[in-house]
Amino acid sequence: MKRKMKFIYAGLAFCALFAGILASKSFAEKTLSGPLQSGLLIADFNSGDKPNNLGGDFGSWNKDATDDTQGSYMSFVADDALGSESGHSVRLDYRVDSPNPAYNGFWMKLNSVDFTSYDTLNFYIKGEPQAGFTKRLKLELKDASGIPQASFVMTGISDQWQKISIPFKEFGAATNWKEMTEFVVVFDDMNSRPKTGSIYLDNVSVSKA
């Protein structure tokens, strides 16, 4: 029975990844400009430490910590997307160049916050030119079920800070927006090119368009 359930979960994960790839769009071209209007700041990382602005934990995650051919690592850097001299962002170093199925990334707890007053996910992102960086990655939002029902594959990352704004409707799947628990960034061996690199993330928020 356990083996059967393992195959079922694997199939669901593959279907979610494939659906995300089909739904991907380049919001780096469509929604870069514009200030945060009425919204909720989730994480500005300006303290250079945990927790986020909601009191939630965050960090890097790995599919297989025993496989040294893949993995991710998070660090704080004094490079603020809005140009503040005292601000910080997080740097995410990733590697999915493995002979085995490879995926890893970044997770952040949302502490069951209610998103029903909002309709857009916002954040700033850029790649590290010296280390190299993927221009494409997967994002997930989880509700109280803990299942990543809402996912989206974004494209268009560059080596300059860009504000990305993604309407919730682009995530596709039905989600309990009243009780959101986690925001996840996924690097994987299907979407990430090159398979090793670094990106910076800052000022994660939700807003009403």
Image (cartoon, rainbow, N blue to C red):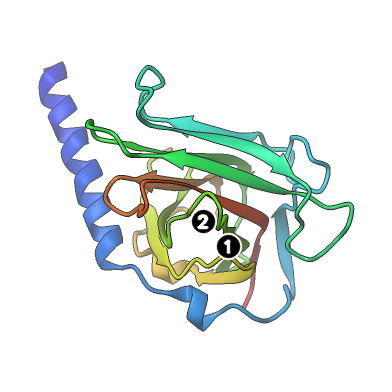
**Where is residue 96 shown, x and y percent of the image?**
35, 39
- Secondary structure, mark 1, is loop
Which label belongs to residue 116?
1
Q: Is residue 145 visible?
A: no
**Where is residue 23 shown, x and y percent of the image?**
30, 68
Q: How far apart, in angstroms, are the residues tagged by discs 1 and 2?
A: 6 Å
Q: Residue at x 41, y 21 (%)?
A: 65
Q: Nearer the viewer, residue 22 or 109?
A: 22
Asked if marks 1 and 2 touch (Cβ < 8 Å), the reply is yes
Q: Which residue is mark 2?
A: 177
Note whether 205 is above or below 55 in the view shown. Answer: below
Q: Residue at x 38, y 23 (%)?
A: 68
Residue pushed farthest front? 130
Which label belongs to residue 156?
none
Instruction: Please identify the quadrant where the C terminus is shown.
Output: bottom right
**Amino acid type at mark 1:** Thr
Q: Is residue 12 left or right of residue 199?
A: left
Q: Residue at x 55, y 34 (%)?
A: 73
User: Which quadrant of the figure has residue 51?
Assistant: top right
**Amino acid type at mark 2:** Trp
**Where is residue 70 shown, x and y percent of the image?**
37, 31
- Secondary structure, mark 2, is loop
Dot placed on the residue nearer the N-terminal end, 1 or 2: 1
**Where is residue 193 shown, x and y percent of the image?**
35, 55
